[in-house]
Image: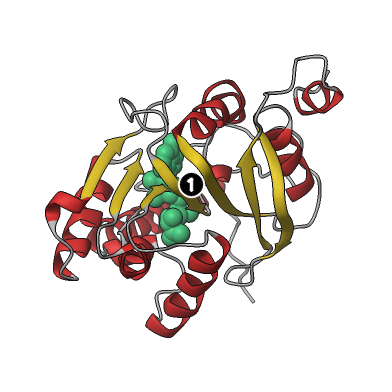
Amino acid sequence: MLVKEYRPRSLWVLLSFALVVLAVLRSSDNSRLVFRTSSTDLAVEANVFAAELRLRPGMTLCEMGSANGALMTALAPSVMPGGKLVATSIERAELEATASALRASGIDDTALSVYLATDTEWAPGLPDGTCDALYSRMVIHMIPEPVILNHYIAQWARALAPGGLMFMTDHNPLDGTTTGPRKGMLSLGGFSLFMEVVPEETEVAQITASRFELEKGPFKHPFFSMGYGAVYRPRRQPATTADPAIAVSAGL
Ligand SMILES: C[S@@+](CC[C@H](N)C(=O)[O-])C[C@H]1O[C@@H](n2cnc3c(N)ncnc32)[C@H](O)[C@@H]1O
C-alpha cells in the first residue's frame, strides 16, 4: 500500500483555509458573538444577571463587551421604564449591532449610550458614578492583564454610582490548569487564536486587591464551560499598595 508522505506544507494550507472559513462565518453572522443563542437559555441567564445586579426600573445598566446586544436586549426590560443603558466594545461594529438589537426590541434610541474601548479606557468619556449596575459576560479573559490591572479595575469602580454592584462572569482555563498572567492574544477575523486564561481565584484576587470588595462568589455560572461569576461592590476606601493582595496579583 502506498502511504503518502506527510507534508507540513499541506498542513499549513489546510490550517489557513480553515481560518479563512472561520473568519468568513464570523463576519457573516453577528449572532455568533453570543454563546448559547437559544432564546430560552438567554432568558434564563438574563434572570440570573437581573437578580445578581438587583435590577430595578430607572437604573442605569452598563455592559462591558456587549457584542451583538443580545444579553443587553434581554436585560433592558428590567430597568424600564426610565432606565438607561451603556454598552462598550473594542469593536465599533459590535456597538452598531447592539444599537440595532435594542432598536429592534423597541427600546428608544435615547436610552442607549455606546463607548468604544481602548487599551487604557474601558469607556472613554463615561462620567464617574454613571452605572447603577455593571456587568460583563466572558470578556475579561479577552483583555490583556496590564490593561485590566493598570486601568480598567479602577475605572469600573469610579463608573459605579453609590450602592452600585458589578457582576463579572468569565471562564476558568479550559484544561483546568493555572496558566499564569493573561497574555495578549492574536485575533483573526474575530476569533482568538491564543488565549491564556487565569483561574477564577486569580481574577477575583485582582479585582478585590484594591478597589472592590467581594459581595458574592465566585460561584459557578453554568452557561458556558468552566464559567464562573462573582459580584463586587466598590470599597469605600481603596486599599493602599501595602495590601498583600495587591502584591500577589501583581506577581510580586
Ligand atoms: C467571548 S466574546 C463575549 C461576547 C458577549 N459578551 C457574550 O457573552 O457573548 C468577547 C467579547 O469581548 C469583546 N472585547 C474584547 N476586548 C474588549 C474591551 N477592551 N472592551 C470591551 N469589549 C471587549 C470582544 O469584542 C468580544 O465581543
Above or below for 51 versus 162 = below
Q: Which residue is mark 1?
A: 192
Callout 1: CB less than 8 Å from ligand 1: yes
Above or below for 154 versus 65 = above
**Does residue 250 appear in the picture of this structure?**
yes
Residue 124 picture location, percent across and down? 33, 26
Q: Amino acid at mark 1?
A: Ser
Q: Residue at x 33, y 60 (%)?
A: 21
Above or below for 201 versus 77 = above
Residue 188 picture location, percent across and down? 39, 44
Position of 147 compared to 240: left or right? Answer: left
Q: Nearer the viewer, residue 24 or 128?
A: 128
Q: Residue at x 66, y 33 (%)?
A: 235
Position of 209 compared to 186: left or right? Answer: right
Extreme-right residue of the structure: 244
Q: Residue at x 34, y 47 (%)?
A: 189
Q: Residue at x 28, y 61 (%)?
A: 30
**Count of numbered marks:** 1
Residue 117 picture location, percent across and down? 36, 32
- Secondary structure state at the residue bearing disc 1: strand
**Does residue 16 appear in the picture of this structure?**
no
Q: Nearer the viewer, residue 18 or 32?
A: 32
Q: Quadrant of the N terminus?
A: bottom right
Q: Quadrant of the C terminus?
A: top right
